[in-house]
Amino acid sequence: MLQIKHLKLTLNGNPLINELNLEVKEGKIHGLLGVNGAGKTSLANLIMGTSYPDEGSIIFEGRDITRFTISQRAKMGITLAWQEPARFEGLIIREYLSLDRNLSLSEAEKYLWTVGLPPGEYLNRAVDGSLSGGERKRVELASVLAMKPKVAILDEPDSGIDVVSLPHIMNGIVEMGKRGSAVLLITHNEEAVSVSEEVSIICAGKIINSGPPQEMCHWFRNNCQTCPHIGEPNYKGV
Amino acid sequence: MLVVKEYEAMIEAYGKAGGNLDALRSNEVGNLVIHKNKVLSVQEVDGIRVETKETESGVSIYFLVEEGARIKYPVHLCFGVLPKEGLQEIMLRVEAQDNSEVNVIAHCIFPNAVDVIHKMDADIKIGDNAKFSYHETHYHGESGGVKVIPKAKIEVGRKGVWESTFSLIQGRVGVLDYDFEIFGDEKSINELMVKVFGKEEDDISIVEKIHLNGQGARGLAKSRLVLNDNAKAMVRGETYGNAPFARGHVDCLEIVNGDGVIARAIPLVYVNDKQAKVTHEAAIGSIDKKQMQTLMARGLNEEEAVDVIVKGILR
C-alpha cells in the first residue's frame, strides 16, 4: 500500500534519512522503533509531505506521491498525528473531529469513547492549552479515527503522556487497525510496538532490521538501547 | 407611521445580523432600540430603569439596574444607522447598584454605511458585589464606510464584576477607535475582550486599560485580531497593579494574513505595590504553520485551514 524507496534527506550535509526502504501493508500495524535522533520524525514528515526528500520516492497505492502536497496526500487517505499536537484556540473537540466531514454526533461520541474520553465532558471543550498532554494526544487519535484514513502515521503517540492515557492510546491504535487502516506506529518504546504485526528498526536514517515484534524488540534492546553511538552527531549507523 | 417603518427596518436588519427577534418581542425581556437619534423601543423589566433623551445627533441614555436586582433574561440593546450616511452619538450612563446582576447584549448595525459615524461615550458604575456582563457585536456592510468610536470609563466596586466583549468580525471594520478604561476596587473582577477581523484598508485602534486599585482585584485585557489585505491595527493593552495582591494580565494576539498588513501591539504592565503582579503576552505573526499542517493532514486545503483557525481565534 505504502512503499518508501531509496529515500534520502540531508540537512546541512548531514544525512537525516539515508537510502531508506520500507513497506507498510494494507490494514496492518507496522511498528517503527528507533532511539532519539534515528530519523523517525523526519521520515513521518516526508511521508506526510511537510518536507520533501532529496532523492527516492514514496509510492502510495501504485502512485508516486513524492512531490504531492499535504492536502493531496490527506485526500488520498494518508494522515499524520504529530508527536506534539497543535493546539487551537476557540476550536471545540466536536468541530475538530468533524472538520469538513459532517461527522454525526454519535460518531464523534464513539471516537471519543474509543480513546477513553467521556463525550459529555469533552465534546464541547476547546482543543487548546486547557487539555493536558495526554488528553490532547487522545483527542488527536480520535481525530485520526474520525478521518478513517487508509494509512495513519502516528509519531510517538505514547510519549510524554500520563499513565492513565497510555492504555486508551493503545486501544485507539488497535481499533484503528481493526477498522482497516494501516498504521505506521513510530516510537522508541518497544512495549508500544507489541500491538504491531511487523516491526522495523531505524538507525541513522535507514532501516537496519525488520521482523516480528517480539524478535525485533529483543534485538532493539540488545543492540540499539546499549549502542555506544546513541546521541553521537553524524553517526552513520551500522 | 414613519417611526413604525423605521422600527420594522431596524428589526429586520437586527434579525439579518443574527439578533434574537423573539427576545425583542417578548414582554419579559428588556430592550432598547435606537435608530440614528430616534428611540424606537424601550422596554423595562423589573429591576431595570431606562431613561432616554433624543439629541440632535444621537441619544442620551441612563440605564439603571436596581439594588439587589438579578435580571433573569439578557437585556437587548440595538443601535444602528440604516442609511448610507449619518451620525449617531450615544451618551450612555450606566449604574448597576450593589448586589445587582445583569447580562446585556448589544447589536450595532450599519449594513449600508458609506459615510457613517457611530460614537459611544459611556460612564459606567458597577456597585459593590454587582455583576455586569456586556457583549457588543457589530454588523457592518462591505463598503468600509463606518467610523466606530466607542469610549467607556468603568468603575467597578468592591467584589464587583465587569466582563465585556466587543466583537467586529462581520463586514468591513472601516475605522475603529476603541478605548475602554476600568478602575477596579477591592476583589473586583475586570475583564475586557476585543475581537476584530480587519480587511482591505481597515484602520483599527484598540486601547484597553485596567487599573487594579483595590486589594485582590483581578484584571484581564485580551484582544484577538486577524488582519487581511492592507488592514492596519494598533493595540495598547495596559494594566496597572496598584494594590496588594492585585493580579492582572494583558493578552494580545494579532494574526497577519496579508502582504500589506501593519500590526502593532504595545502591552504596558505597571506595578507600584510589591505584592501585586501583572503579566503580559503579545504575539503578532502569520498563522501558525503547525496548526495549518495539522488541518491539512486531516484533508482541508490551505484556504479551509486558514478559515478554521481564524474562526476559532475570533470566536
Image (cartoon, rainbow, N blue to C red):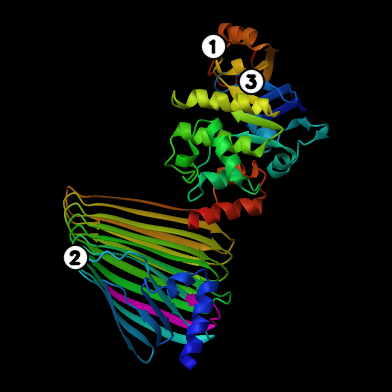
Q: Which residue is denoted by mark 1 in the rendering?
A: A225
Circle 2 SS class: loop
- Distance from label 1 to label 3 (Cα)? 15 Å
Do labels 1 and 2 touch, CB within 8 Å?
Answer: no
Residue range corresponding to the magenta coloring? B109-123
Same-chain status of marks 1 and 2: no
Q: Main secondary structure of the magenta part?
A: strand
User: Which chain contains the residue that carries disc 2?
Assistant: B
Do labels 1 and 3 touch, CB within 8 Å?
Answer: no
Q: Residue shown at 70%/40% (left/top)?
A: A74
Would residue A47 appear left or right of A223 to someone viewing this image? Answer: right
Label 1 or label 3, whichever comes before in sequence order = 3
Q: Callout 1: 10 Å neighbours few (<14), some, many (20+)?
A: some
Residue A94 is tagged as none
Residue B132 point in image, percent of width and height = 29, 64
Residue A32 is tagged as 3
Type of the residue with mark 1: Gln
Reply yes or no: does residue B116 show up in magenta.
yes
Circle 1 SS class: loop
User: Which chain contains the residue that carries disc 3?
Assistant: A
Give the image quarter of residue A223: top right
Type of the residue with mark 2: Asp
User: Which chain contains the residue that carries disc 1?
Assistant: A
Q: Which residue is denoted by mark 2 in the rendering?
A: B98
Q: Residue shown at 44%/26% (left/top)?
A: A162
- Distance from label 1 to label 2 (Cα)? 68 Å
Q: Residue shown at 41%/55% (left/top)?
A: B252
* Residue at the outermost right position: A62
